[in-house]
Image (cartoon, grey):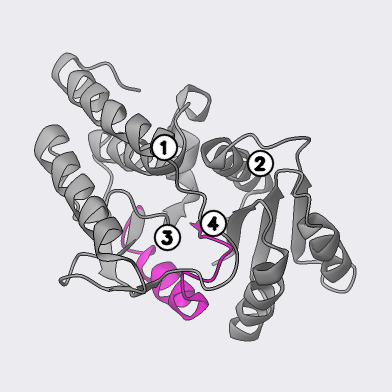
Amino acid sequence: MRALIVTPTYNERKNIGELIEKLFVIDSDYHLLVVDDNSPDGTADLVEELGNTNPNIHLMKRSEKLGLGTAYIAGFKYAVEKGFDCVVQMDADMSHNPDDVPRLISEISENDLVLGSRYSTGVNVVNWPIRRLIMSYSANLYSRIVTGLPVKDATGGFKCWRREVLDAIDLDGVKSQGYSFQIEMTFRVWLKGYRIKEIPITFVDRTVGESKMTRAIMLEAAIMILRLRVWRIFGWHR
């Protein structure tokens, strides 16, 4: 199965080299697309340098910080255009374990979307402050109750998509970012009746660099969950 891994970056120079090294040790046939939002720390320069010796490393440089959601949308469109069989989305900060990538890909043959879930078998999160853990767990519970989306980790960003599913989604209609983006994309897949499976992962909070989480992102997610409820009731989805 021809797999593309998409990872958005903004100031991830300290992490991206390790991620690339580990991914290609696991499987040298993987393709990796880094979508960089003009990182001031030279992330794109490092990726470009590494790509000079590995043709499976691809770089998409954007002119400014345009957000996580639009970065993934750009990556998904690239995957559809290039005809990859499946697409793995993951963070560049090593909070998603590269060793779990083969597990996600192996499940996609029988499913349309595979979610790496922090909460499917309890709570599998390392190094998070208790306040952030409670906030994340509560957001997922709120999302499940309000929208009816039957997954335990709707806000997680470690996923494997079948290309045909991405091709069937109106990607241009997805405008949300951050947590909100993760919820909306999974919700759209669920409403279309595609097969979704959660598999347990252990999420380890970044040890290098800074978190991109903001209050604006959390507020957007809370509002989006209410919108999704309305979409489901009135059938306003594509």
Amino acid type, label 2: Glu
SS label for mark 4 = loop
Q: Position of residue 119 (x, y in %)?
A: 21, 64
Residue at the disc numbered 2: 81
3D distance between C-alphas at marks 4 and 2: 11 Å
Circle on res. 148 = none
3D distance between C-alphas at marks 3 and 4: 17 Å
Q: Residues within 10 Å of mark 1 (few under 14, many from 20)?
A: some
Tell me which label, 1 or 4, sits earlier in the chain: 4
SS label for mark 3 = loop
Tell me which label, 3 or 4, sits earlier in the chain: 4
Circle on res. 85 = 4
- In this view, 215 is above or below 199: above
Front residue of 54/90: it is: 90
Front residue of 187/142: it is: 142
Residue pictured at 61% horizontal, 76% vertical: 23
Residue at the disc numbered 1: 217
Amino acid type, label 4: Asp
Amino acid type, label 3: Phe
Task: Write down the region rendered in magenta.
Answer: 88-112
Residue pictured at 63% horizontal, 34% vertical: 66
Tell me which label, 2 or 1, sits earlier in the chain: 2
* Membership of 41 in magenta stretch: no
3D distance between C-alphas at marks 2 and 3: 22 Å
Is there any visible trace of residue 197 in the rendered image? no
Tell me which label, 3 or 1, sits earlier in the chain: 3
Residue at the disc numbered 3: 158
Mark toward the viewer: 2 or 3: 3
Q: Residues within 10 Å of mark 4 (few under 14, many from 20)?
A: some
